[in-house]
Image (spheres, rainbow, N blue to C red):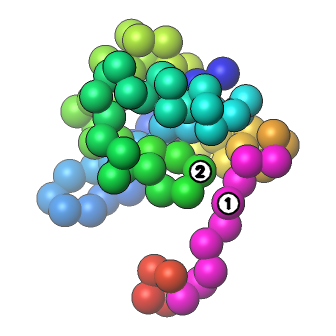
């Protein structure tokens, strides 16, 4: 299932949400491609999506979930990819 969370991440003067699949990366990329979601938006296990696109993606079939549920679904499916703490300059 394709899921999208509510936009809570501020960056670059806008809010961002996350688009993911709890089934496979193939399913996620197949959903994203015809909707012209740039490949550069893929961040290891999800796409970063500007909030302005969220409603269109829900209309295209993504299910709105909380951020916690999105992470839980990725983890349960074995698709969660954590990045090293130093990757974001922490």
Rendered-image quadrant of the N terminus: top right
Q: Residue at x 67, y 48 (%)?
A: 71
Q: Which residues are magenta?
A: 78-86
Is 80 inside the magenta-drawn segment? yes
Q: Residue at x 69, y 34 (%)?
A: 24
Residue 41's tag is none
Q: Left of 64 or right of it: where is 12?
A: left
**Is residue 3 shown to the viewer in this render?**
no
Q: Are marks 1 and 2 in contact (CB under 8 Å)?
A: yes
In the figure, residue 84 lies in which quadrant? bottom right
Q: Left of 58 or right of it: where is 26?
A: right
Could you say where residue 66 lies in the image, as x and y percent from the top left?
58, 38
N-terminal of the pair, mark 1 or mark 2, is 2
Q: Residue at x 59, y 50 (%)?
A: 45
Check disc 2 and report its element: helix, strand or loop.
Answer: loop
Q: CA distance from mark 1 to mark 2?
A: 6 Å
In the figure, residue 49 lies in which quadrant? top left
Could you say where residue 69 lies in the image, as x and y percent from the top left?
68, 39
Compared with 15, 29 (above or below) is above
Seen from the viewer's position, the closer of residues 2 and 38 is 38
Is 26 inside the magenta-drawn segment? no
Which class describes the residues within 10 Å of circle 2: few (<14), some (14-19), or many (20+)? many
Could you say where residue 9 lies in the image, as x and y percent from the top left?
38, 56
Residue 45's tag is 2
**Is residue 28 shown to the viewer in this render?**
yes
Most common secondary structure along the magenta stretch:
loop
Q: Left of 57 or right of it: where is 85?
A: right
Residue 81's tag is 1
Could you say where residue 83 lies in the image, as x and y percent from the top left?
61, 72
Q: Residue at x 44, y 88 (%)?
A: 89
Numbered label tally: 2
Check disc 1 and report its element: helix, strand or loop.
Answer: loop
């Amino acid at each position: 299932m394709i899921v999208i969370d509510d936009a809570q991440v501020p960056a670059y003067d806008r809010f961002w949400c996350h688009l993911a699949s709890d089934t496979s990366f193939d399913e996620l990329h197949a959903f994203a491609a015809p909707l012209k979601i740039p490949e550069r938006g893929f961040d290891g296990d999800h796409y970063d999506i500007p909030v302005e696109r969220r409603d269109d993606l829900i209309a295209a079939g993504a299910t709105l979930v909380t951020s916690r549920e999105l992470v839980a679904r990725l983890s349960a499916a074995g698709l969660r990819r954590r990045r090293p703490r130093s990757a974001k300059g922490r």
